[in-house]
Image (spheres, grey):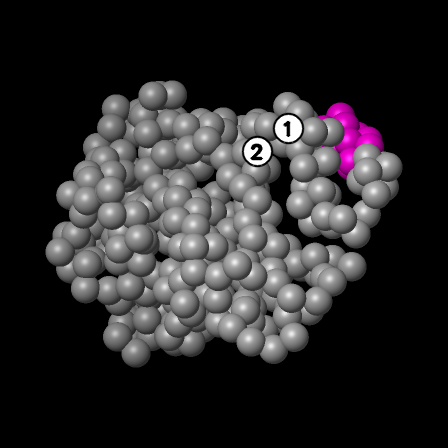
Amino acid sequence: GRKKASYPKRQHDNVTKCPKYDKLHPGTLFLQTAPNLFCSSQALIKYLNLSGGRRQGVKIIHMVRNPYHMAISNYFYHAQIPTPERWIHKAMPCEYRYFPESYIKELAPKSIGNTVESTISKTSKSLDEEESMKSLILPTLTEISPKQFDKAFRMCRALFRNETSFWSTSEISRGNASFYDHLLFLDQYDGIRLSAAQMILSSGLEFFKAPLSIERLRKRKRHAGADILRMGNNIRKLNEVTANTEQFRVLTMDMANWISKPHESSLNVVDFVFGSSATIEEKRNMADSYVELFVNEVADDSSHV
């Protein structure tokens, strides 16, 4: 059977820096969306229970996508009228810290009110001292320098709630404009740049009116953000794991091929999952069933880009 993820997407344990995969069972397909694999490869092996016990091994199908396509799709999908997902109205595209001081009740007893903008405008030096997408991902993606990350942050801040010409012709005030407002009113070039920055660095935190306790903030749902760098981090982390144990196998699937070649891709997946335990005819039947389901879903859903 298939079980949904037992751990929220884009979140991690505050100690280990990885999701707690404590509900994996032999023979079960387990779905995890946007996992934060920020722990060491040794810790990830432990949480997947590969270091001992009766587990025969774990197979992971990792769905990846061209980062350029992710950024472009992110912009056009969320800039639709009306936008398909409500969280976009409260998104904080330039906030890459997980626990901003002004949002923690113990550190900020006053109502947040209009302090949000000043909170996310802090210098990168002060942000480095806290848990953030920068501190969690850059140790793994060593090709990206802190200066390059900071450049993306400065670009985001230059576009979000900054002085731009469209505010003079809009009924929306600059200080209250949402991420969605920016996607609608910025010209396409700047809109794509802001959307790309959100996909590079945002921790997925949303605006809210009053500070929360650190525990409530830790459990708060995280929406899309930093998925481009998260994907790169997870690819490298899974590669490290496969290099350290033979019990861990990973099949990396390109979403472009999954969409353009559904039968070939699904056949590769079922062959990877079932191996010699299923006949070629059984695998082809499973692939045929998926293709039929895929074609029907594409025909029924016109909102995704």
Q: Which residues are magenta?
A: 286-299
Rendered residue at 42%/76% (across/down): 215
Rendered residue at 26%/55% (across/down): 139
One can see residue 57 in this view:
yes
Rendered residue at 60%/60% (across/down): 58
One can see residue 116 in this view:
no
- Kindly identify the amino acid type of the residue bearing the numbered disc 1: Ile
> Where residue 35 appears, x then y in whole percent?
49, 56
Label 1 crowd (10 A; few <14 / some 14-19 / many >=20): some
Location of mark 2 (residue): 255
Is 268 in front, or is 127? 268
Is 37 situated left or right of 98 in this image? right
Discs 2, 1 touching: Cβ within 8 Å: yes
Is 170 situated left or right of 139 in this image? right
State how far apart marks 2 and 1 are (Cα).
6 Å
Q: Is residue 290 magenta?
A: yes
